[in-house]
Amino acid sequence: MMQVPFNVEARAVNLREARSLYFGRGELPEALLDQNVLRSWERCRQAGLDPSRLSCGEPDMRGVVEARERNRTLISHAQPVLEHLFEQIRNSHSMVILADARGMVLQSYGDADFLSRAEQVSLRPGASWHEFERGTNAIGTALAERGAVNVFGSEHFFEGNAFLTCSASPIQDAQGRLMGVLDISSDYRAFQRHSLGLVKMSTRIIEKRLFESEFAHQGLLSFHTRPDHVGSLCEALLAITPDGDLVGADQAALELLGLRREDLSRRHYDMLFDVPLGTLIDRARRDPSSLIAISGRNGERFYARLRGNFGAASSSVIHALNEARSERAPKLVKPEPEVPAGGKPRLTLQFLSTGDERLQMAIDKAQRVLGRDIPILIQGESGAGKEMFAKAFHNSGPRGQGPFVALNCAAIPETLIESELFGYSGGAFTGARKEGAIGKIQQAHGGTLFLDEIGDMPLSLQARLLRVLQERCVTPLGTNKSIPVDITLVCATHRRLKEEVARGSFREDLYYRLNGLCINLPSLRERSDIESLIDKLLREEAGPNRQVEVSRKVMDAFMRYRWPGNIRQLNNVIKVAIALLDDDETLIETWHLPDDIFEEIGQMEGSMAAELPPQTRSSAPNLPASAVVNDPASGPGFCRLEEIERDMIQRTLEAEKGNISAAARRLGISRNTLYRKLGRF
């Protein structure tokens, strides 16, 4: 990168000469311009842009709303960095800008005096600063060059932007894909040499946050050739599965190891380092903050620290991994956090983390109150995973070995909920057991009491529950004896309790007693981690010895579907789809889905096709000849729909030699649907 002289006016004189040579005489001013800028000028000229153009159109305010929605992940990780960066440059006649991968400005912070000038050239949210829209500029040129750039004064292709000086750096996601650009812009006379360094450092922070969020459910290996750089922005990061597969690497790791991103799938931990992965796991369990010296296969010396989901790996797994040396270790059952004897991973808050920002925010909040006497109120739609979150919260805290007792306040008749919750002594009421019964509150002693659908609790019981929470004692029905209880209370509801309080159906004093920490779980259709969640559900349902995947068509349909039943519905769909797979099938297609989902997805695709222009619809796959039906209004001889359907099924079965699974796939329906239709015919 060219070092801009301190003498701003001298630099401005050199640029006037460069513009005269390039735009006046058609000569390349290679000695006067940075090569990034010169290449950009060439691209702009080839695109037919006029350097004297002043107007570039107004910002697209509707488009920026859609762009922000598309870039929710980027914004959520970049927002705090933007705010902090602006604090570093405040009162320097500057602004900080976040743009997406298309060059549209998403967010900006700036000094008022400079913002007014920037708005004159539409340097504000909603405006596109792609090179082909705004000529050479730091945002557009950083995107085009895929690297950090300075664009000073008259280096801007358009003369109207010559009062600006801008420093920008592209932002990549965990897979190396371009996500956006971070930029500092100011008046060229207020140029600061350190601006590009600040931008590059801030970009690194954002990329690190994106990487750690993407691979939150994997182990992260931090390493560097210098021990003091491990834990800093300079560290390299590898995402590793418990059996050593490499699933992610940041740019620093690729450079230190001399790898290309496409090499990752063909590499294994044991092919890169001499210290067995089991040794790192063991060290992480004993002392998570310690460093260990490891050597690369080419003799390079690194210092490393492992963190993530390896801390609870069993000793047998560690022993097996320690046996691995230069050859790839055999496939083992992947150790999830605290895997019990049953084989399924222990449900913890960390296990729930699959990359969604809103869910991660809820997880982070919950982790901060673990072990504290603070009640939790979980709000969300039915099926959004409220009980799962409550169990994960219980398992993650110091009460994890104690009981987790759940009571659905909406599923028990009002006449029985009091005895279920508080218990009763023998003979307390007609039909009571002679020996009495311990209530849910007392059963939860030493652990967690989870009251689901707390908004449906009768008003008469709300006062008793409030007294229990205040006095930490429970009095069973039919007795005056108070029994001390030590519980953590977690409640959940799909209702808005504040609105119920206003309507008088929920006690205000109980609401404020329950609402220690309010957690709002996003509905499934609002989450950005649906693919990761589906992968996790597939692994759990299919088991460790079967690799099942979802076809791209089904995944696209899942992403469009609104999931009114949320995670509960998705889980059931995955279970049914795996059950409908033949023994030799590993790919879930549309015909493996439950009939109601299959039909709804078909209706969605039909409505989407209806919205396409005629020339697009005409390119759809041709239907079999037997499926072509004359319009009943066109005359006699037309067939009933049932006859056409029966004929098509018969022809398909004959073509597939009676193979039901193959015929169902060819017809685009599930086997169950085909069996049902055959029975009807």
Image (cartoon, rainbow, N blue to C red):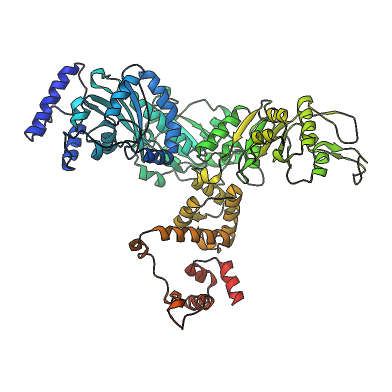
- The C terminus is located in which quarter? bottom right
Residue 433 x %, y %: 90, 44
At horizontal 61% and vertical 49% (from top left) the residue drawn is 568
Q: Is residue 105 above or below residue 594?
A: above
The image shows a total of numbered marks equal to 0
Foreground: 319 or 314? 314
Residue 62 x %, y %: 38, 40
Q: Is residue 542 above or below residue 119?
A: below
At horizontal 42% and vertical 26% (from top left) the residue drawn is 81
At horizontal 35% and vertical 33% (from top left) the residue drawn is 125
- The N terminus is located in which quarter? top left
Check the image and name the residue furthest to the bottom: 637
Left/right of residue 322 with respect to residue 503 in the rendered view:
left
Check the image and name the residue furthest to the left: 25
Q: Is residue 423 visible?
A: yes
Foreground: 333 or 60? 60
Residue 216 x %, y %: 50, 37
